[in-house]
Image (cartoon, helix red, strand yellow):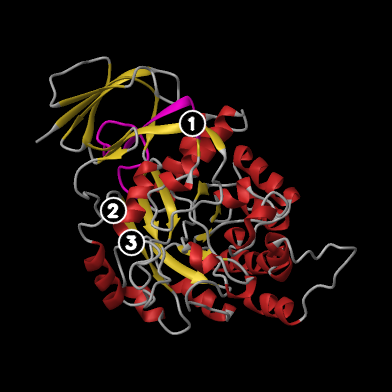
Amino acid sequence: MSSLLIKNATLASGQIVNIFIKDGLIYDIGNKSPLCDQKIDAQGQSIIPGVIDPHVHFRVPGAEYKEDWQTGSKAAVAGGVTTVLDMPNNQPAITTQKTLDQKRRLIKNQSYVNYGLYLGATASNLNELKTVSGIAGVKVYLGSTTGDLLVTDYQIVEEILAETNQIIAFHSEDEECIKQFSIFPPRRRAGNFQFSNIAKRHNQLRPEECAEKSTGKIIELVKKTKKRAYICHVSGQKEIELIRQAKDQKLPIYAEASPHYLFLNTQSAIDLGNFAKVNPPIRSEVSQQALQLSLSSGLIDTIGSDHAPHTREEKEVDYAQAPAGVPGVETSLSLMLNLVNQGAITLARLVELMCSTPADIFKISKRGKIEPGYFADLVLVDLKLTYEVKNSKLYSKCGWSPFSGRHLKGVPMAVIVGGRLVYQKGKIFGPPGGCEVF
């Protein structure tokens, strides 16, 4: 039995309230000041629901030298994230009930934030996908990337959509298209193919048309099966247009944007080298701008960090040998708050993208909103404070960010997970206390 009172907090609506928390739940929102075990005076700072990040790779099991659940969840909570959904491309890949349960045992009592787990699809595990329960969803990799999960037969993809009762999340890059460009790379055109620019090179070897091709096929299968599909890390202008058309037809298609596509492009990432190598690749400034516009228009449903850490040593090699992926769970909220301060989106729209809509799509009960009866997963943010992203200050084990050196306006100051103060002004408190949400 514990209680916490947050006084003088400003909701996204602008209303200043006291929030009384009891036994891990939001008990009352108003102007009351009941007796409690602990008080926090927000002094007018904004309060939002805890961020739900539907797309992380915390590298357990098999690659704990890159990240583990304690370091990954510390990075999450320091970034205002209170729930993460972790991907299945581990070593071994999480494709059966047995490997899922083994992963659960490894994670138990290790996470500072709440979590859910995906199961990975293969060409031959449909029966597992049909019977598994208690997962975030099924992940289908249509293009090769980190790990060995891959489904290239769209007939199998149709069967997965038609015969499972889970939401299907897609890494949408067509493998045959990728192979075509790796065998016959684009010719140098007027200096356009700059090998000194890794982001541009990678984008030309895995171009937007590969994502456009697979996303188009997914949409056709959704039209046929009437099942829900979640397109991870949408990146290209034409892919965005396909999703717009699908939504106009009221198809159950959901689109995720990731910060590295929203805030980097092939030119701005020129100095990052392999530290900007990611799948799908960083795109052109035109696609970046189209993606940002899709935030305010409502086309994009969620923000997924696609937190995919690798060590510096792994990145500091030749392009062909460097793994693809960047960390992001620790900086995603501040990047989006900075966008709020620039007037590109409202704070209420940020809450939709990062809190309430992910909870709705993935059916995460009693999270993502500030309402009585909901779990007390909350973030106090200072919208006026500016800070510099510094590699030396990050909690992630990999110790670097593609946004290092950026000054961002909008900082998570205190984070409450399940009614317990876990983070405040740069410090993390207590043992890991996150729970599985499915």
Compared to residue 194, the image places residue 392 above or below, namely above
Kindly indicate the quadrant of the structure image that contains residue 188: bottom right
First along the sequence among labels 3 and 1 = 3
Compared to residue 400, the image places residue 28 above or below, namely above
Q: Residues within 10 Å of mark 1 (few under 14, many from 20)?
A: many
Kindly indicate the quadrant of the structure image that contains residue 1: top left
Query: What residue is disc 3 on?
Result: 68
Q: Residue at x 22, y 36 (%)?
A: 25
Which span of residues is magenta-colored?
363-387
Amino acid, disc 1? Gly
Query: What residue is disc 1 on?
Result: 410
Q: Residue furthest left?
A: 1
Alpha-carbon span between mark 3 and mark 1: 27 Å
Q: Residue at x 72, y 60 (%)?
A: 197
Q: Is residue 381 magenta?
A: yes
**160 and 55: which one is in front?**
55
Element assignment for label 3: loop
Disc ID at residue 437: 2
Q: Is residue 184 left or right of residue 232?
A: right
Estimate the x, y position of residue 97 in percent, counting from the top left.
Answer: 29, 75
Amino acid, disc 2? Val
Q: Residues within 10 Å of mark 3 (few under 14, many from 20)?
A: many
